[in-house]
Amino acid sequence: MKVYEYQAKEIFAAYGMAVQPGFVCRTPEEAVEAYRKLGVELAVIKAQVHTGGRGKAGGVKLAKTEEEVKQRATDILGMDIKGFTVDRVLVAQAVDIASEFYVSIVIDRKTKGAIMMLCREGGVDIESVAKETPEKIVKIPIDPLIGLPDYLAREAAFKLFDDMTYVKQAAPILQKLYRLFKEKDASLAEINPLVITEQGQVMAIDAKMTFDNNALFRHPDIFEMFEPTEEEKKEQEAKDKGFSYVNLGGEIGCMVNGAGLAMATMDMIKLYGGNPANFLDIGGSSNPTKIVEAMKLLLSDKHVKVVLINIFGGITRCDDVANGLIEAFKLIDTNIPIVIRLTGTNEAEGRGLLKGTKFNVAHTMGEAGKMAVELCAKCK
Ligand code: GDP
Ligand code: MN
């Protein structure tokens, strides 16, 4: 679960980290009001969206008069940043930045624990630093039993600064960041940039946090901030209907019975050079209503160009599934090519029923994957 920058900063502040005073606003008028309340000369107007790269997209602007604040807020509100529409901005006291650094804590699969990443180049896209000059990023695994005591926090801070005055300020920030990461079950806590101000203060001017969904039950305060994205809403709807569905952004919609088979199906699509649109396990059932629901779910994703249905008939019989599909598609109006692979109990009967229909019937998984990818290529 993601939160907005202003929410992450509220959490930072609750842990005693210094953040700029600011207000979240939904209209240009509110932005002007916030600017008055701040009583500062220079303000920064920042788009609040569940994605980074706002600066580059023009979603972070400085303003030094009420007119400018109003103008900037008008420009930024309603803006589209990587598919997210800006519906609120943070109006905060602008900071005089002398230099920018990068700090984050994430879960690292290799060390099976939290890892702190530090970089002297902050404020830039960290993915490109990681790609082009990975040696500039220092990674420090954190032992969960030791945590980040003073000496380790200082050692980490020295990776960013040579000057002791900054190290002394940064070490407690790193400790607080780790404490909140751990206590709130975060999967990411990132400060990019952590800055040195012209006045010599070390300060977080951006804040990004992601939380582990499976731990939200023990953090009602965090869960309260949950605002599902369109994708997450769809995933929740699917869950309510008894499906497990994960949107993956590709073009081949998958409908499979069984989670393991669903994963193998996605692998197969990848093997043939395609991209799965989703993971969808419909469970063991040939019930047409369920198939209709699942198809509606798949087709509501506008990226889907081909649907691949992969069913293994164990207890579910293939002829039942074939009948279910035929019934279901009487109710679904779509021109999207459908590839079906049916195997298992009564597979010959099942395939017999599908003969002469608009479905593209495949025998093996490989054949199904290949067919789906080829049909998808033709649709482009
Ligand atoms: P992001 O682009 O989504 O990561 O948004 P950030 O909050 O990191 O802002 C992007 C960039 O805008 C920062 O790297 C800074 O260079 C600049 N910026 C953000 N806030 C301020 C501020 O208060 N004062 C100044 N001078 N620049 C800022
Ligand atoms: Mn940033």
Image (tube, rainbow, N blue to C red):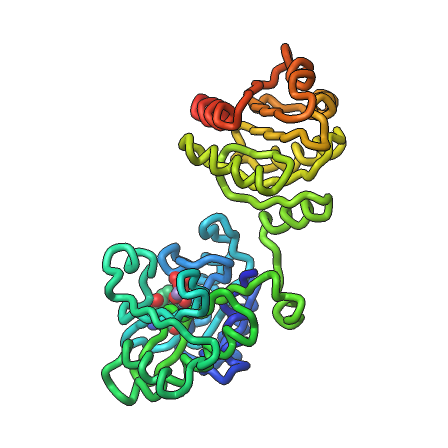
Quadrant in the rendering for residue 298:
top right
Quadrant assignment for the N terminus: bottom right
Spot occupied by residue 260 in the image (x, y as percentages of width and height): 58, 41
Which residue does the image show at 58% across and 19% down from the upper left?
A: 361
Q: Nearer the viewer, residue 23 or 335?
A: 335
Total tally of numbered discs in the picture: 0
Spot occupied by residue 275 in the image (x, y as percentages of width and height): 46, 36
Position of residue 9 relative to residue 275, above or below, is below
Residue 154 showing in the rendered view: yes
In this rendering, position of residue 187 left or right of residue 134: right
In this rendering, position of residue 259 left or right of residue 101: right
Residue 193 showing in the rendered view: no
Spot occupied by residue 93 in the image (x, y as percentages of width and height): 43, 77
Which residue does the image show at 41% across and 74% down from the upper left?
A: 142
Q: Nearer the viewer, residue 361 or 217?
A: 361
Quadrant in the rendering for residue 273:
top left
